Amino acid sequence: MDPFDFSTGTTNPETFPTDALAQAAARAVQAHAVELNTYPGRLGHEGLRKLMAQREFDREGVRLDPERIALTNGSMQAVTLVAEALCEGHDDIVVMEEYCYSGTIRAYRGLGIEMAGVPVDGHGMRTDALASTLERLRSAGRVPRFIYVLATYQNPTGHVMPRDRRMELLRIAREHRCIVVEDNCYGDVHFDGEKVPALYALDDGPRQVYLCSLSKIFAPGVRLGYLTASSPDLFDRIVDRRFDAGPNTLAAAITAEFLEGRLWEHCEMANQALKAKRDAMLAALEAGLGNTCSWSRPPGGMFIWVRLPDGTDCARLEAIAAERGVSFSQGSDFHVDGQSGPYIRLAYGFARVADIHEGIARLAQSIEEAIGHRAHP
Ligand SMILES: Cc1ncc(COP(=O)(O)O)c(C=O)c1O
């Protein structure tokens, strides 16, 4: 493993609550012997669904019916389930941010879905470009199966879509009668400033699908996410596509036992540690790359998106940085068509603060070397 790992998109290893979780596990197994010896059904552990309904109410002020929440094997299962349910096996096209989560891109590519990338700016998906993309598709007689969007602490850019742009996105989607699939994986990884409402909380129409996760506020290894939809028909259409006999009761029961009564306390503690890492990375970038590169300043989430000088050979940079023990993700991994641009994504959750300072200094040296400053002083 690289000592300066800025590629792994997980939360702090330091805030993982090993002892308290072990105690919760013992209690959960005792309390759930019957459920553990039974198939979970299509929605999964009721206690965790109720807790997630409360989580959504606390954040968005929207009362979700726990009977319309389905737990999934991470939100990644929800990402694929939605596509399997809403695509038709021919001429399938999904509209999404041009730079988007690489896992979704890989999954949709694997399912044979065409992806239409909409350019992003510092406020997320550009709605003027969304409108023209949908118009272009309409003129070609094509109907997107859905719009997939990461409006909050976007992966990979860290950007947040402001409220007025969200309203505009919803208006455009309504005009085209298009389903919106909102992936709010990072919604509670919040550090500063105002929290912008989720898209589903701003629209009471029937074409909203919402995905969320426990990976980013708790632990990716529990593999727990969930989905809901704004109409019972849409919800059933998606959940009827699941053939896995339901989500893991053991993981859900232990997680619910641990988080009950302390969800926000746990988030607060994890977010404080993450915020310190974000701040350390921003300061180190300023010190090392202030004259060469520009980058995003995310108010939440786990990633900083760095724009390298034009013409930087990212593959060369990756090799040079690896020699110095530094890893990051290449911008092309997040492009819907795999296009290479002058971007890299830095993840700050996994590394320790001290390693962030040293690792970013090494990255700065690597960038200078890659762009040839050393050769032409
Ligand atoms: C935007 C986004 N969606 C979904 C996922 C999948 O997360 P999980 O399956 O662990 O919930 C990730 C993980 O990085 C992500 O960044």
Image (tube, helix red, strand yellow):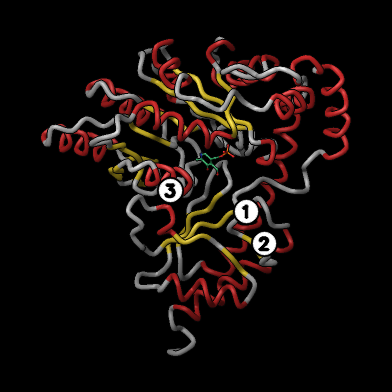
Residue 186: quadrant of the picture = top right
Q: How far apart in space, not on screen, are marks 1 and 3 (Cα)? A: 23 Å
Tell me which label, 1 or 3, sits earlier in the chain: 3
Q: Position of residue 38 (x, y in %)?
A: 71, 17
Assess mark 3: CB under 8 A from ligand 1? Answer: no
Q: Label 1: few (<14), some or many (≥20) within 10 Å?
A: many
Q: Measured along the vertical axis of the image, is residue 93 above or below residue 57?
A: below
Q: Tell me, yes or no, whether the two marked residues, 1 and 2, touch with CB atoms within 8 Å.
A: yes
Q: Which mark is residue 356?
A: 2
Q: How far apart in space, not on screen, are marks 3 and 2 (Cα)? A: 29 Å
Quadrant where the N terminus sits is bottom right
Assess mark 2: CB under 8 A from ligand 1? Answer: no
**From this viewpoint, is residue 157 visible?**
no
Q: Secondary structure at mark 3?
A: helix
Q: Label 2: few (<14), some or many (≥20) within 10 Å?
A: many
Q: Which mark is residue 348?
A: 1
Q: How far apart in space, not on screen, are marks 1 and 2 (Cα)? A: 8 Å
Q: Label 3 is placed on what type of residue?
A: Arg
What residue is disc 3 on? 106
Q: Secondary structure at mark 2?
A: helix
Q: Label 1 is placed on what type of residue?
A: Tyr
